[in-house]
Image (spheres, rainbow, N blue to C red):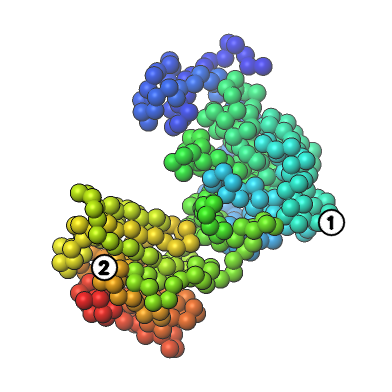
Amino acid sequence: MVDKAARTAFVCQQCGRAASRWLGQCPGCGAWNALVEEAVRETRARETRTGASAATPRPLVAVTAGDTVRRSTGLGELDRVLGGGLVQGSVVLVGGDPGIGKSTLALQACGALARQGLPVLYVAGEESPEQVRLRAERLGMAEAGVGDVHVLPETATEAVIEQLERMRPAAVVVDSIQTLHTGALASAPGSVGQVRESAALLVAHAKASGVACFLIGHVTKEGALAGPRVLEHLVDTVLYFEGDSGHALRVLRAVKNRFGSTNEVAVFEMGERGLAEVPNPSATFLAERPAGAPGSTVLATLEGSRPLLVEIQALVSRSALALPRRAAIGLDVGRVALLLAVLEKRLGMPLHDQDVFLNVAGGLQVDEPAADLAVVAAVASSARGRALGEDVAVWGEVGLTGEVRAVGRADARLREAARQGFRRCVLPAGNTRGIDAPAGVTAEGVTSLDQLFDVLELR
């Protein structure tokens, strides 16, 4: 029970800003009716998180950095995103849309760790143990493989930590962090205060005990993790699941990682028996690419340290509207509008009365500027009705004056294109200086869109 004499504050459920009295609109983020009264126990929270004694400063040269203890999760793609394995004492936050596969991935990781003889605790805040067992059977997890996976149907944070101290597992999965609540606060589970305090208690225990912790988080309709941004600052690694129900492919992306590279991606395929690793994502993304179709261009993109080949599709058709439509799936709409303006201004391509639709086949989200040249080539190919060669891959950044700018890691993109059987690569001329193209691959450098159109015969 919460002490009635405890000081309270009104906390915004969107941004976490606290106010001394209730307000209709949050002064921080502008959200309406988002302030909820919560108990504030600063002393207790501070003692719980930091302990009784304060740390003393030490010279940096006197600090010894031991080897980071990593364990393989049994899933090679997940290990790649985590930076080589699961770090002892780390806290990993996994977010994604409902039904995308977060719980499935967590349970498969639990089974893989259990098969290594490591005890694992699965905290089921949203499902009963029977439901978790049914999912495990559907995933094909044998009895011998799940013997060390223990299910705890609990939503009280203090009770979860008590079980962790008693069981001392190698890893724990909390599904989901929004269902936990602590007795230190009077607010309902899922509120900003409860999410923040519960996560802080679990992080403190993970650092003290060395247990690796997976926190599964809900996302809002905007695609951001529910709860305050401080939740992402508390954890060591933040992973996002991307994909949609219309595609079997799922992309797991690391946007924060204290123990490895950020923006790494893992590619899985959702099937009847759970998530299956995709060892060759480029071939999967290009498997259904139509041959000889205008408007189709292959882009060599980078996701973290991994080069991928994806198909950029464009459809240009005469518009019956006063304001032609501009739509893009998997690409930044603002950048697409910029490229269309460059095409019309610098190359005289009439697009003012044309609807333009763009799509990244396979459901991948491409954010890097190196996609510019492939977008331009796809739009021009559709507008001219001329197909590009089946063995051509394109990448490069386009400036407002129509120049083509160099991008990073052209050698890795070339090697991936050669591995997938592409023989012509059109790239910025600045990337061709000193580059060693693989045998059988021609690297054709361009400095402007005029030169691109000549090379690809799109005039």
- Relative placement, left or right, of 243 versus 322 is right
Label 1 crowd bin: few (<14), some (14–19), many (20+), radius 10 Å? few
Residue, disc 2: 383
For the point 78% across and 48% down, the residue is 149
The residue tagged with tag 1: helix, strand or loop?
A: loop
Q: Closer to us: mark 2 or mark 1? A: 2
Amino acid type of disc 1?
Ala
Residue of label 1: 144
Image quarter of residue 429: bottom left
Look at the image and tell me whether residue 114 can be seen: no
Q: Residue at x 72, y 55 (%)?
A: 139
What is the quadrant of residue 51 in the picture?
top right
Say which quadrant the C terminus sits in: bottom left
Left or right position of 392 against 381: right
Q: Answer with left or right where residue 303 lies relative to residue 332.
A: right
Residue projecting furthest to the top: 5
